[in-house]
Image: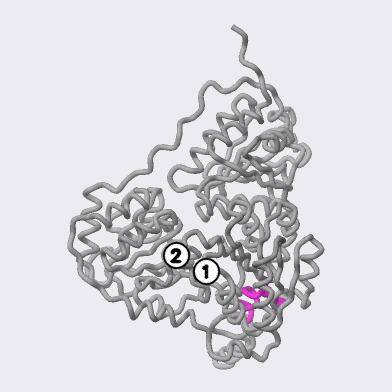
């Protein structure tokens, strides 16, 4: 019997990836994983996406996995490449996004000698991944890849990093005899847990649900539970697409600067069901909500999560169920219980009021557009089911309030607040689902961090729309400085910059808008274009948030100091 044929270890790795239905690898090619990129490039059904920066590659892989639920691959070389990629990986960790990360490393014989660009990548990546490991044998690479896929997609999803010395991918090895098994079935809600939760919700006077990213794939089941038990529904931080915003039971988005009237039903609730949310600092409004029970003894919070480590981690719970959100909600929707009708129309109308811009936005005297006017133009021109990728920055508070997410899988946004996310995320979303309208919404700070990925979009044939709120500021930091210090430092970006020319220099289209009419025209033309388009919307830096002006915050700080003195 002839021995099994030998093939480069990288080809066996790609076999495993293809078998898991992974279709793209995002990377800045490096010398430490030449054979991996070569094997992916030659594999039918897979696509190698070369990006302009590893930060862009990381955000693209994270966005694809968030949109599809299937891991994507990001690859970077040694120390500098791995460091650049880390922001996207941390985003995946905080967003519970499955992702496979290959990190090139120095050759096996040189490990531990501070070789060229050597970093202890296992130690570096361990805090920002579910699992980080260094492989030192070529014949274990495929096995480790299969194990990484299992870890990334089991329980609470997340990124896994595999560091690979540069001499291993090309080493000829036989096909692996056995690989780790497939991902086990996701656990259901037990019958006893179902009945206890159903009776609790049925008896409550003002029950509400907080739905997070873990409920992204359980939208119809979530609607069924809300309607069955007449519960109000909140979307956790930057997960506004988990529940249709126009639904009369939708209570709003638990984001930054959440208006008090939005929080009132949560404060008054006597039963809070948390589904698929890790109850982040922002969602809980600084770990203040859900508040301890005021309607009786004990906790009034129950939690359903795929990860037992998340249950009760932030808020005390009277019942915690380890279960898949979709299966658990489906069971609850069919529980044999009679429930009372609760009227949340007033609370829903209160949320609707916060999404309505103030009078005079269209005729704002400037300088520049009122940020509300930009969102209004989006709503008038863009399809309601557009995929919106949004960056970090104060402009996003207008987007979060003003854009209504009525369709599933239409929001890609980092809960980590990482700047530079929107443009790369939009490129990935358009590559994955080219039939959908994809719009990146960013400030000038975020756009200038990763806007060079417009070249990737142009080269790969991904006609995304990039809408930039250019106000010449790092707006979030300027707001904090104005409020806390009464003056600004280091937050000016300069300009106005000619971002339309910047886009054209990268092979994309560019347009500048200083009036609502110009903006609507630019958006309409971008929808019909066959190339990526950047629209530079010049906005007024004075309008720093929906409820404050920059000069007003500075003046208020001075008044406070004088009063204290």
Looking at the figure, which quarter contains the N terminus? top right
Residue contact between numbered discs 1 and 2, judged by CB atoms under 8 Å:
no
Q: Earlier in the sequence, mark 1 or mark 2?
A: 2
Rendering quarter of residue 392: bottom right
Give the residue displayed 31% in from the left and 76% down from the top: 344
Mark 1 — residue? 384
- Seen from the viewer's position, the closer of residues 483 and 405 is 405
- How many marks the image carries: the answer is 2
Query: Is any part of residue 101 visible from this angle?
Result: yes
Give the residue displayed 72% in from the left and 62% down from the top: 451
Q: Residues within 10 Å of mark 2 (few under 14, many from 20)?
A: many
- 202 above or below 25? below
Q: Is residue 314 found left or right of 299 in the rendered image?
A: right
Give the residue displayed 32% in from the left and 68% down from the top: 208
Looking at the figure, which quarter contains the C terminus? bottom right
Image position, residue 138 (x, y; %): 65, 26
Q: CA distance from mark 1 to mark 2?
A: 21 Å
Residue range in magenta is: 468-483
Give the residue displayed 45% in from the left and 34% down from the top: 182
Image position, residue 31 (x, y; %): 77, 38
User: Outermost residue, front direction?
Assistant: 528
Rendering quarter of residue 422: bottom right
Query: Is any part of residue 541 visible from this angle?
Result: no
- Seen from the viewer's position, the closer of residues 224 and 565 is 224
- Seen from the viewer's position, the closer of residues 555 and 529 is 529
Image position, residue 388 (x, y; %): 57, 65
Residue depth check, mark 1 versus mark 2: number of the one nearer the observer: 1
475 part of magenta stretch: yes
Rendering quarter of residue 42: top right
Q: Say what secondary structure mark 2 lies in.
A: loop
514 part of magenta stretch: no
Mark 2 — residue? 236
């Amino acid at each position: 019997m002839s021995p099994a044929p030998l093939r480069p270890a990288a080809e066996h790795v790609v076999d495993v990836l293809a078998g898991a239905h992974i279709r793209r690898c995002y990377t800045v090619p490096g010398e430490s994983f030449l054979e991996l990129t070569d094997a992916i490039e030659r594999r039918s059904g897979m696509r190698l996406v070369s990006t302009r920066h590893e930060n862009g590659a990381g955000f693209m892989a994270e966005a694809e996995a968030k949109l599809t639920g299937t891991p994507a691959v990001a690859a970077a070389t040694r120390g500098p490449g791995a460091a650049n990629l880390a922001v996207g990986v941390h985003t995946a960790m905080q967003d519970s996004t499955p992702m496979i990360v290959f990190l090139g490393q120095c050759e096996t014989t040189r490990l531990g000698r501070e070789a060229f660009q050597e970093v202890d990548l296992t130690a570096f990546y361990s805090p920002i991944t579910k699992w980080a490991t260094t492989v030192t044998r070529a014949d274990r690479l495929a096995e480790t890849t299969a194990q990484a896929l299992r870890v990334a997609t089991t329980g609470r999803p997340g990124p896994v990093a595999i560091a690979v010395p540069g001499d291993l991918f090309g080493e000829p090895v036989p096909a692996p005899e056995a690989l780790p098994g497939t991902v086990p079935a996701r656990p259901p809600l037990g019958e006893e847990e179902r009945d206890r939760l159903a009776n609790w919700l049925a008896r409550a006077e003002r029950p509400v649900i907080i739905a997070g990213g873990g409920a992204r794939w359980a939208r119809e089941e979530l609607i069924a539970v809300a309607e069955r038990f007449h519960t109000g529904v909140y979307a956790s931080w930057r997960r506004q697409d988990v529940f249709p915003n126009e639904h009369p039971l939708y209570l709003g988005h638990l984001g930054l600067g959440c208006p008090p009237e939005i929080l009132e039903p949560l404060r008054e609730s006597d039963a809070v069901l948390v589904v698929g949310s890790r109850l982040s600092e922002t969602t809980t409004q600084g770990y203040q909500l859900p508040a301890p029970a005021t309607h009786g003894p004990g906790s009034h919070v129950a939690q359903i999560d795929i990860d037992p480590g998340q249950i009760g981690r932030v808020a005390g719970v009277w019942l915690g169920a380890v279960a898949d959100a979709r299966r658990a909600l489906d069971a609850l929707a069919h529980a044999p219980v009679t429930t009372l009708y609760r009227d949340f129309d007033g609370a829903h109308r209160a949320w609707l009021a916060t999404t309505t811009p103030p009078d005079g936005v269209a005729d704002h005297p400037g300088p520049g557009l009122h940020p509300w006017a930009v969102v209004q133009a989006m709503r008038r021109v863009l399809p309601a089911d557009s995929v919106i990728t949004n960056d970090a920055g104060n402009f996003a508070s207008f987007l979060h309030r003003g854009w209504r997410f009525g369709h599933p899988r239409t929001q890609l946004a980092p809960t980590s607040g990482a700047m530079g996310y929107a443009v790369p995320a939009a490129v990935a979303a358009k590559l994955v689902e080219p039939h959908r309208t994809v719009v990146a919404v960013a400030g000038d700070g975020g756009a200038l961090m990763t806007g060079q990925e417009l070249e990737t979009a142009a080269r790969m044939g991904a006609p995304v729309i990039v809408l930039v709120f250019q106000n010449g500021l790092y707006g979030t930091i300027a707001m904090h400085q104005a409020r806390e210090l009464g003056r600004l430092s280091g937050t000016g970006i300069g300009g106005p910059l000619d971002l339309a020319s910047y886009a054209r220099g990268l092979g994309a289209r560019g347009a500048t808008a200083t009036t609502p009419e110009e903006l609507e025209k630019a958006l309409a033309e971008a929808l019909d274009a066959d190339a990526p388009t950047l629209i530079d919307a010049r906005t007024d830096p004075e309008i720093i948030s929906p409820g404050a002006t920059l000069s007003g915050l500075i003046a208020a700080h001075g008044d406070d100091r004088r009063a204290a003195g």
